[in-house]
Amino acid sequence: MTNNDGLRPYRISVPQPEIDDLRERLTRTRWTSDLPGTGWERGVPAAYLRELGAYWATGYDWRAHEAALNAYPQFVTTIDGAQLHFLHVRSAEPGATPLLLLHGWPGSIVEFTGLIGPLTDPAAHGGDPADAFHLVIPSLPGYGFSGPLTETGWTDGRTAAALVELMDRLGYQRYGVQGGDVGAFIAPLMGRAAPGRIIGVHVNALVTFPTGDPADMAALTEADRARLAAMQQWQERSGAYMQLQGTRPQTIAHALTDSPAGLLAWIVEKFQDWTDPAAKLPEDAVDRDTILTDVSIYWFTGTAGSAAHTYYERFNDPAMWVPVPLPRIAGSAGSSDGCGARPARIWVSTNVTLANSASITTSPGPASGSATLAGSRTSGGPNSRITTARTTRASSAQPERFLPTPDILSERITPDKERLSR
C-alpha cells in the first residue's frame, strides 16, 4: 500500500474560469423537447431541466455554498496511491464517540452537512450531550474532492481498507461507521476488516437474497415473493443507470464530463425517484440549491465518470458476490415492514457479513438511495445510538436496488452475474 501519512489542510477553491465555463456551457446547451403527453415516467422532462439549468447558470451562487463547505475543517491525505478528502469535525464534548459517515451515489459530503450540528453538539439541538460524535466525512475514492481515480482496482474492499487506514491516522482506536447506498456496502466491509476497533455499523440498506436453491425458493413467504417481484420490476424499469455505469462506465463518462446539462439530468432524476414520493418535483423534497451543490461538486471535480467506474469495479469483483451463510451478529437489524432480519436459510453476500465482535443495525425502513441531503430526517436502528441521514421514500413497495432479479435466483451467483447486482 503506497501511502503518504501526512494530513494536509484543504480548502475548496474552484477557479473562476471554471465557473464561467460552466455557465457558458449551460447557455449553449442544445435542449431536447418532450413528446406530447409524457412526463417523469420517461426521464427528466425537457421543460423542467431547461428551467433548472437556467437557474444553475444565472441564479445559483456556487461561491456561497463553497464558503459554507469551507466553514468545516477539511483535509486530504494519500492512501494506497489515491488522494482522500474528508471533513473532520470534532465535538466539544470530551466523551464524544468518533463516527465515520459514508455517502453513496449520486451523493457527496453535502448530504451530511445538515447533520453536523446535531451530531457534534446535540445539546444545542435539544439532545443529550452524551450522544455527541466526532465526525469524519470522507469523499469516497473517485468521488468529489478526492478527485478522479488514476488506476483500476478500487473495489469496495480496497476502499474499506483505505478508510480503516484513515481512521488510524486520525488516532481513533474505537469508532462507529454509518453507510448509505454505496456506503452501505463499504461500512460492513470495514467492520469485517477491523472488528476489534469498530464498535458498530449502521446501514440503510442491508443486502440479502435467496441462495437460488429450490428448497429456499419454495420456503419464501408471500412477503418475500412480493419483494422479489417488486425488485424485478425495478430492475426492468429503473435500473438502466446501474447497468450502464457497471458495464460501460467510460462511455457515459464522456457525456457526463462534457455536458453539464447531461450531468444535471443524470443526477436530478435520482432526486425525483429516490426521495419523497409525495413530492411533485425534486426540490419539493430536497432544497434546490442543495441539489445543485451536489451536482456542482461532480462537475467541478470531473468525477462523474470516475464514480461510474466504481460500479464496474463492484460488478467485476468476485469477492463481492460469493454467497456465505448469515452469521449470528451482536446487535440487531430491523425495518418497518419486517424485511430486516431474515431466516437462516436466506443468505447474504460477504459485503454485509460482520465478524461476531462487531454489531450491525439498519435504519427502520428500506432506503431507496442516498439522495436525501442536508436537513433530512434522522433515525437509528434498534439498539443503535448512531444516527443516519436516510431518504424519505421508505416503503415496502420500493425494492432494494442492488439485488439480483428473480429469474437469476434460480442459478447460483457467480462473478459473471455480478452485473445484475449493484
Image (cartoon, helix red, strand yellow):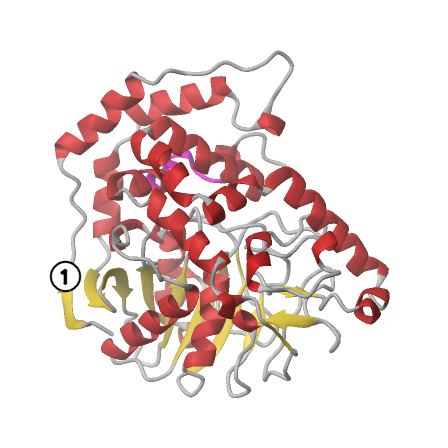
* Secondary structure of residue under mark 1: strand
- Residue at 54% in and 15% down: 34
**Is 290 on the left-hand or right-hand side of 171?**
right
Report whether residue 104 is seen: no
Q: Quadrant of residue 190?
A: bottom left
Residue 342 in the magenta stretch? The answer is no
Badge 1: residue crowd in 10 Å (few <14, some 14–19, many ≥20): few
| Span shown in magenta | 286-293
Q: The disc labelled 1 sits on which kind of residue?
A: Pro
Indicate whether 24 appears above or below 210: above
Residue at 41 percent of width and 60 percent of height:
125
Q: As displayed, is residue 401 above or below residue 294?
A: below
Residue 324's quadrant in the figure?
A: bottom right
Q: Tell me if 68 is positioned left or right of 106 in this view.
A: left
Which one is nearer the viewer's eye here, 304 or 285?
A: 304
Residue 326 visible within the image:
yes
Q: Position of residue 371 (x, y in %)?
A: 48, 46
- Residue 108 location, x and y as percent? 37, 51
- Residue lying at the far top in this picture: please name it: 36
Left or right: 236 as drawn, with respect to 416: right
The overriding secondary structure of the stretch rendered in magenta is helix
Q: Position of residue 237 (x, y in %)?
A: 65, 38
Residue beneath disc 1: 9
Residue 110 in picture, x, y percent from top left? 36, 49
Q: Is residue 284 above or below residue 247?
A: above
Q: Is-magenta flag for residue 291?
A: yes
At horizontal 25% and vertical 39% (from top left) the residue drawn is: 300
For the N terminus, which image quadrant? bottom left
